[in-house]
Each structure stands twice: as structure tokens, then as C-alpha cells.
Image (cartoon, helix red, strand yellow):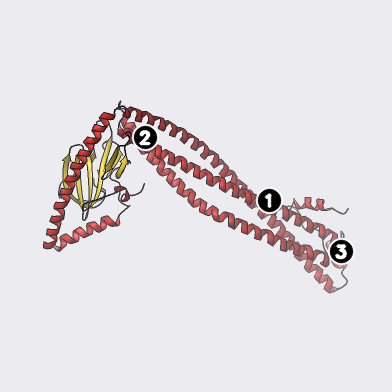
Amino acid sequence: MKPNKSFCNAIANETDSYRVEKSTKRNNCVRPLFTFINSSAKVYSSLFLLLLLVFGPAAFAQKTKAQLQKEKKENLLKIKEAQATLKKTSAQKEVSIGQLNAFQFQINAQANLIANYKSEIALLTNGIEQDQQIINALEKDVHNLKQEYGAMIYAAYKASKGQDKLTFLFSSNSFNQFFRRIHYLNQYTEARKKQVQQINAVRKMLSSQINTTEAKKTEQVELLTAQLQEKEKLEKLKRKEQSAIASLGSREKEIKKEIKKRNKSLATLNKLIDNIIAKEIRAAAAAAVKSKSSATTTKTLSADFAKNKAKLTWPVKGFVSQRFGISKDPVLKGVQHNNPGIDIQTEPNSQVACVSDGKVSRVFIVQGFNRGVLVNHGDYYSVYAKLSTVTVEKGQLIKAGESIGTVHTGGDGIAELHFEIWKSFTKLNPEKWLMGK
């Protein structure tokens, strides 16, 4: 019985077990054979271009994802540090500015974390859409290849008129025709084997792509759940922040008095540092005239400090509770602060480390800033104030990372280091010199 096209297509679906059994004639089989070769080339050319277009951006997206995950890890660390600080001060019945700063820092880190989740989800959504385009293209290729395969079988059956191989060969009119028929039969058989291989290859790619997409969808759901949880945490923190602001707002007179006292202490501190630096510059100039080695040491320390801009290690672990320069008061409207350095909130009794190689210029005490240390780095100076204990002395050479003392914990339970960087008489923003985190 003569098979129809649907029958041949059904055979094509069983390509793994199907084997070449029919013969063909030259004039009838050459066309489908070369049609198959040409069309398959088109299918794989279009697939290659599609993969190139899709996986090109995907590779870039992977880099972005890695970057986002790095940022997420950093934000989680910041949140952990803020939580550790708040945990130490939670026993204090009265809310302090330090606690409010910790809340606000944590809120900012939490918001950044949520933004990271949002960006990761957007990347996955885009990736899933791209994957679906690939899956659609692969499914289309499988369908086209099966149709071609079915058409080849149908054409071969019609060409041979149901004859088996031997009958077809020995019905040749001449030896040349016999030889050509063997050649075309072999060529046709090889083409059908390649067709089967291509169908199986595309099926494998399709299966792999579907698995990849399903994994991305699972990850997407997990990220959405995590994002929702972080949003709930953020809302809780905002409620705590508002409660702290309300509590502090009721103590406006007291806070204004504290600000006035701090500003007076800052002025005293900066005048002291200014005087010490002026004396050191004069002494260094006089020493340079007498000794070339003294000038060389100053230049070496300066160069070493300068080349490590944005690479200096942090003096303590923690977060910046008050930034360099002018900033608004978190509670009092219209009140501003002008900070010559930065304040780093940390855990009580934290060790304070020197940020670069240098020489201790002075150990001092300033009311409101407790104990402090000034370290000379050639043309640069680093200032460490609000220390509880000091483990270095004037004239001592000190290495980067070496401890200079422990941070002081105030009556409000807040442990905070005041840190400054100067270049001669110019105050610099320490955050631009410290290693990013």
C-alpha cells in the first residue's frame, strides 16, 4: 500500500529507530536531497544568528548580575554592621542621635538591597524572554527538519515505486546507470543520517534551553519572595526611624545645647591640629636644610600615602554616621553641621588602626573628643579622636594596620570614631581616601 505524507511524517517522529530501507531514482531523488541540504543550512544559519544576537547580550547580563550580587553582599554586610551597633545600644532607654544615624544608615542600605533584588529580577525576566525566543526558534527548527525528513521519505518511495534496493539497481539499462544509482543511493542514505543527527542535535539544544529557563524562573520566584521580605523589614525600620525622630524632637533644646558644645570642641580640636602641623612643617623645613635623609623620608611617606588614595584601610569597622563637609541635622530643621572629617560608628571597644605608615606627631586630649592621636605621613596627616585608650606615643614610628588604641563609648552607648585627613593645612574628605565598601 502506498503511504501518504502524514504517514511519512509519522515515521519522521521515530527517527531514532528508523533506518533507510527504500531506494530512489536519480531524477526524482536529487531534488529533495539538495533541497534538504540547502534548507538545513538556512535553518542553522538563522539559528546561529539568533544565538549570536541573544547570547551576546546575555553574556553582558551575566557580568551585570555578578556585579549586582557583589553589591547585594556589600549591602547585607552594611546592614549587619548597623544591626550590631543597634544591638549594643538597644539597652539605652533614651533614644540618641547615634541610634537615629544607625537607623538611617540601615534604611539606606536596605533600600539599596531592595533595588539590587529589583535589578536582578529584571535581568532574569529579560533572560527568560530571550530564552523563550530561542525555544520558539528551536521548536520551529525541529518542526521544519521533521517535515523535510518526511518529504524525503515520501519522495524516495515515489521515486522507487515501491521497489527494493536490489530490484532498483539491477533494473538499470547500463553499467553507467547502475553505478550512478549506487552513488545516489549512498548519497541519499548519508543525507538521511545527517538529517536524523540534526533533528537529535536540535532536540538536545531545545531540552537544555528549557531546563535553563525553568531554573531561571525558580530563581526569579525566590528573589521575588526575598524582595518582599526585605520590603517588610524596610517598613519596620522606617517606623522606628520616625519614632526616634519624634522622641528626639521633643528634646530640641537639649540637642541644640549638645550641637553647640560639639562645635566648640571641634573648633578647639582643629586649632590644636593646625598649630601642631604648623610646628611640624617648620621643623621639617629646618631638618631638610641640615639633612637630605630627612627630606627623603618626608617625600617617601607623602608618595606612599598619595598613591594609596581610595585604597587606605578603614581605621575601624562600621559605617559613616556623619559625612565630611556640610550636612543637614537629622532632627532639627534649618540646622546644619560642618564636619572637617567623618564620624564612623562602630562596636564598643573596637581597636582603631592606623591607615598608613607614618610617625606619631602628638597624643592629645580635647574635651568632647576624649583622647586623640595625630599621625604624620609626610605632607599628609591622619587624625583619630574619640579614643578611650591610646597604645602609641609621640615620635613612635607606626605601620599601616597597627593599633593606636580603642574607640570611646559615650554615655548614650554609642561607640564612634572621629577621623580626619589633612594635607598640610587643607582638610580632605576621608571617604575619598578610604577603600570603598
Mark 3: amino acid: Thr
Left or right, 23 with respect to 398, comes to: right
Mark 2 vs mark 3: which is more N-terminal?
2
Task: Choose between 33 and 285: the one closer to the eye.
Answer: 285
Nearer mark to the viewer, of 2 and 3: 2
State the residue position of label 2: 103
State the residue position of label 3: 167
Kind of element beneath mark 2: helix
- Badge 2 density bin: few <14, some 14–19, many ≥20, Cα 10 Å: many
State the residue position of label 1: 139
Q: CA distance from mark 2 to mark 3?
A: 91 Å
Nearer mark to the viewer, of 3 and 1: 1
Number of on-image labels: 3
Q: Residue furthest front?
A: 334
Could you say where residue 348 lies in the image, as x and y percent from the top left?
A: 27, 35
Q: Is residue 416 above or below residue 65?
A: above
Q: Is residue 420 visible?
A: yes
Mark 1: amino acid: Glu
Mark 2: amino acid: Phe
Residue at image coords 19%, 58% = 298
Mark 3 vs mark 1: which is more N-terminal?
1
Mark 2 vs mark 1: which is more N-terminal?
2
